[in-house]
Image (cartoon, grey):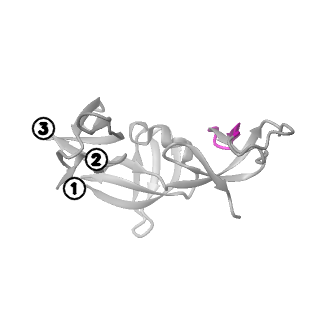
Protein backbone atom coordinates (compact mmCIF):
# COMPACT_ATOMS: atom_id res chain seq x y z
CA UNK A 1 0.00 0.00 0.00
CA UNK A 2 1.48 3.35 -1.03
CA UNK A 3 1.36 6.24 1.47
CA UNK A 4 2.90 9.71 1.44
CA UNK A 5 6.22 9.96 3.30
CA UNK A 6 4.96 12.62 5.74
CA UNK A 7 2.40 10.15 7.18
CA UNK A 8 5.07 7.69 8.41
CA UNK A 9 5.21 7.22 12.19
CA UNK A 10 7.35 5.28 14.64
CA UNK A 11 6.44 1.58 14.46
CA UNK A 12 5.32 1.63 10.79
CA UNK A 13 6.87 -0.91 8.46
CA UNK A 14 8.18 0.23 5.08
CA UNK A 15 9.17 -1.92 2.10
CA UNK A 16 12.17 -0.74 0.06
CA UNK A 17 14.13 -2.74 -2.54
CA UNK A 18 12.30 -5.92 -1.52
CA UNK A 19 13.34 -5.59 2.16
CA UNK A 20 11.26 -4.63 5.19
CA UNK A 21 12.26 -1.77 7.51
CA UNK A 22 10.74 -0.83 10.87
CA UNK A 23 10.50 2.95 11.39
CA UNK A 24 12.31 4.02 14.59
CA UNK A 25 11.88 7.79 14.19
CA UNK A 26 10.23 10.04 11.59
CA UNK A 27 10.53 13.83 11.45
CA UNK A 28 9.07 16.31 8.98
CA UNK A 29 11.17 19.37 8.08
CA UNK A 30 9.55 22.50 6.59
CA UNK A 31 12.32 24.95 5.68
CA UNK A 32 11.43 28.54 4.82
CA UNK A 33 12.77 28.04 1.32
CA UNK A 34 12.90 24.79 -0.57
CA UNK A 35 11.02 21.52 -0.47
CA UNK A 36 9.64 20.08 2.79
CA UNK A 37 11.24 16.71 3.57
CA UNK A 38 10.65 13.73 5.83
CA UNK A 39 13.71 12.24 7.52
CA UNK A 40 13.25 8.64 8.69
CA UNK A 41 15.50 6.42 10.82
CA UNK A 42 14.73 2.74 10.21
CA UNK A 43 15.96 -0.72 11.19
CA UNK A 44 16.18 -3.43 8.52
CA UNK A 45 14.15 -6.31 9.90
CA UNK A 46 16.18 -9.12 8.29
CA UNK A 47 19.53 -8.23 9.90
CA UNK A 48 18.91 -5.31 12.31
CA UNK A 49 21.05 -2.78 10.36
CA UNK A 50 19.98 0.83 11.00
CA UNK A 51 19.38 3.03 7.96
CA UNK A 52 18.48 6.71 7.52
CA UNK A 53 16.40 7.85 4.57
CA UNK A 54 15.08 11.24 3.44
CA UNK A 55 12.10 11.76 1.15
CA UNK A 56 10.14 14.77 -0.06
CA UNK A 57 7.01 14.88 2.12
CA UNK A 58 4.76 14.27 -0.91
CA UNK A 59 6.72 11.24 -2.22
CA UNK A 60 4.93 7.92 -2.15
CA UNK A 61 6.46 5.17 0.00
CA UNK A 62 5.48 1.49 0.06
CA UNK A 63 4.03 0.66 3.48
CA UNK A 64 4.15 -3.09 4.14
CA UNK A 65 1.01 -4.86 5.29
CA UNK A 66 1.74 -6.41 8.64
CA UNK A 67 -0.44 -7.94 11.31
CA UNK A 68 -1.09 -5.45 14.11
CA UNK A 69 -2.82 -6.62 17.27
CA UNK A 70 -3.13 -5.59 20.88
CA UNK A 71 -1.06 -7.66 23.29
CA UNK A 72 -0.62 -7.68 27.07
CA UNK A 73 2.94 -7.45 28.35
CA UNK A 74 3.80 -10.34 30.69
CA UNK A 75 7.49 -10.29 31.69
CA UNK A 76 11.05 -10.16 30.40
CA UNK A 77 13.88 -12.64 30.80
CA UNK A 78 17.07 -13.72 29.01
CA UNK A 79 15.12 -14.66 25.87
CA UNK A 80 13.45 -11.26 25.49
CA UNK A 81 10.13 -9.58 26.25
CA UNK A 82 7.06 -11.82 26.48
CA UNK A 83 3.60 -10.71 25.30
CA UNK A 84 0.22 -12.47 25.24
CA UNK A 85 -2.70 -12.00 22.84
CA UNK A 86 -5.71 -11.55 25.21
CA UNK A 87 -8.24 -13.40 23.00
CA UNK A 88 -6.26 -16.47 21.92
CA UNK A 89 -3.72 -16.55 24.81
CA UNK A 90 -1.04 -16.97 22.12
CA UNK A 91 2.35 -15.79 23.41
CA UNK A 92 5.07 -13.98 21.48
CA UNK A 93 8.61 -13.06 22.46
CA UNK A 94 10.06 -9.79 21.16
CA UNK A 95 13.81 -9.23 21.10
CA UNK A 96 15.73 -6.31 22.62
CA UNK A 97 16.09 -4.84 19.09
CA UNK A 98 12.30 -4.59 18.67
CA UNK A 99 11.56 -3.12 22.11
CA UNK A 100 14.61 -0.82 22.35
CA UNK A 101 14.35 2.18 24.67
CA UNK A 102 10.59 1.63 25.13
CA UNK A 103 11.45 -1.11 27.65
CA UNK A 104 11.26 1.42 30.53
CA UNK A 105 7.50 1.75 29.96
CA UNK A 106 6.78 -1.99 30.00
CA UNK A 107 5.00 -2.85 33.23
CA UNK A 108 3.13 -6.07 33.85
CA UNK A 109 -0.28 -6.02 32.14
CA UNK A 110 0.28 -2.88 30.01
CA UNK A 111 -1.51 -3.11 26.65
CA UNK A 112 0.70 -2.48 23.60
CA UNK A 113 0.29 -2.89 19.86
CA UNK A 114 2.73 -5.41 18.40
CA UNK A 115 3.26 -5.49 14.66
CA UNK A 116 4.19 -8.94 13.41
CA UNK A 117 5.31 -10.14 9.99
CA UNK A 118 4.91 -13.89 9.37
CA UNK A 119 4.53 -14.44 13.14
CA UNK A 120 7.72 -12.58 14.11
CA UNK A 121 7.42 -9.36 16.19
CA UNK A 122 9.00 -6.48 14.25
CA UNK A 123 7.69 -3.30 15.89
CA UNK A 124 6.12 -2.21 19.16
CA UNK A 125 3.75 0.70 19.71
CA UNK A 126 3.12 1.93 23.25
CA UNK A 127 0.00 3.74 24.45
CA UNK A 128 0.29 7.52 23.85
CA UNK A 129 0.27 8.20 27.62
CA UNK A 130 1.31 6.15 30.65
CA UNK A 131 1.01 6.74 34.39
CA UNK A 132 4.22 6.60 36.45
CA UNK A 133 5.08 7.48 40.03
CA UNK A 134 7.68 10.09 40.94
CA UNK A 135 10.29 8.58 43.29
CA UNK A 136 12.68 11.48 43.62
CA UNK A 137 12.57 15.21 42.90
CA UNK A 138 14.02 18.46 44.16
CA UNK A 139 12.10 20.34 46.87
CA UNK A 140 10.07 23.39 45.86
CA UNK A 141 12.05 26.62 45.98
CA UNK A 142 9.99 29.41 47.55
CA UNK A 143 8.98 32.06 45.03
CA UNK A 144 9.59 29.74 42.09
CA UNK A 145 5.97 29.50 41.02
CA UNK A 146 6.26 30.76 37.45
CA UNK A 147 4.37 28.43 35.14
CA UNK A 148 7.36 28.08 32.82
CA UNK A 149 9.75 26.72 35.46
CA UNK A 150 10.11 22.95 35.56
CA UNK A 151 12.35 20.80 37.76
CA UNK A 152 13.93 17.39 37.10
CA UNK A 153 12.32 14.29 38.60
CA UNK A 154 13.05 10.56 38.52
CA UNK A 155 10.16 8.15 37.94
CA UNK A 156 9.62 4.67 39.39
CA UNK A 157 10.79 3.17 36.05
CA UNK A 158 14.10 5.09 36.21
CA UNK A 159 13.15 7.67 33.58
CA UNK A 160 14.09 11.35 34.08
CA UNK A 161 11.35 13.88 33.27
CA UNK A 162 10.83 17.59 33.84
CA UNK A 163 7.81 18.35 36.07
CA UNK A 164 6.14 21.51 37.41
CA UNK A 165 7.30 22.75 40.86
CA UNK A 166 4.15 21.54 42.71
CA UNK A 167 4.85 17.86 41.89
CA UNK A 168 6.58 16.03 44.74
CA UNK A 169 7.88 12.51 45.40
CA UNK A 170 5.12 9.89 45.58
CA UNK A 171 2.88 11.76 43.12
CA UNK A 172 1.54 9.77 40.17
CA UNK A 173 1.81 11.61 36.85
CA UNK A 174 0.90 11.01 33.20
CA UNK A 175 3.75 11.21 30.68
CA UNK A 176 3.78 11.18 26.89
CA UNK A 177 5.62 8.09 25.60
CA UNK A 178 6.75 9.77 22.35
CA UNK A 179 8.95 12.49 23.86
CA UNK A 180 8.93 11.52 27.59
CA UNK A 181 7.28 14.81 28.56
CA UNK A 182 5.02 15.57 31.54
CA UNK A 183 1.32 15.81 30.58
CA UNK A 184 -0.64 16.09 33.84
CA UNK A 185 -1.16 14.75 37.33
CA UNK A 186 -2.80 11.28 37.29
CA UNK A 187 -6.49 11.33 38.14
CA UNK A 188 -6.58 8.25 40.39
Q: Which residue is mark 1?
A: 65
Asked which secondary structure carries label 3, the reply is: loop
Asked which secondary structure carries label 1, the reply is: loop
| Vertical relation: 2 (above or below) 53 | below
Q: Which residue is mark 3?
A: 17
Residue in the image at 76% along x and 47% along y: 167
- Label 2, label 3: how far apart the Cα atoms are: 20 Å
- Label 1, label 2: how far apart the Cα atoms are: 18 Å
Closest to the camera, between mark 1 and mark 2, is 2
Where the N terminus falls, by quadrant?
bottom left
**Labels 3 and 1: the sequence-earlier one:** 3
**Labels 2 and 3: the sequence-earlier one:** 2
Residue in the image at 80% along x and 39% along y: 144
Q: Give the class, few, some or many, for how many residues have Cα within 10 Å of label 1's Cα (few <14, many ≥20).
A: some
Percent coordinates x, y for residue 38 in the rendering: 28, 39
Please state if 111 lies on the left or on the right of 132 as rendered: left
Q: Are marks 3 and 1 in contact (CB under 8 Å)?
A: no
Please state if 170 lies on the left or on the right of 69 as rendered: right
Residue in the image at 65% along x and 39% along y: 162
Q: Give the class, few, some or many, for how many residues have Cα within 10 Å of label 2's Cα (few <14, many ≥20).
A: many
- Label 3, label 1: how far apart the Cα atoms are: 15 Å
Q: Which residue is mark 2?
A: 6
* Disc on res. 8: none
Percent coordinates x, y for residue 91 in the rendering: 41, 57
Q: Which residues are magenta?
A: 149-159
Seen from the viewer's position, the closer of residues 73 and 140 is 140
Amino acid sequence: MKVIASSLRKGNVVEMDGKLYAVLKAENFHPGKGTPTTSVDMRRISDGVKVSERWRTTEMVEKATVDEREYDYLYSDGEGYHFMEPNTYEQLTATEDVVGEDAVFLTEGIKVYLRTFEGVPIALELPQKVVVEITETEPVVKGQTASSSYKPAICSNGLRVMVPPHIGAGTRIVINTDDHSYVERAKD
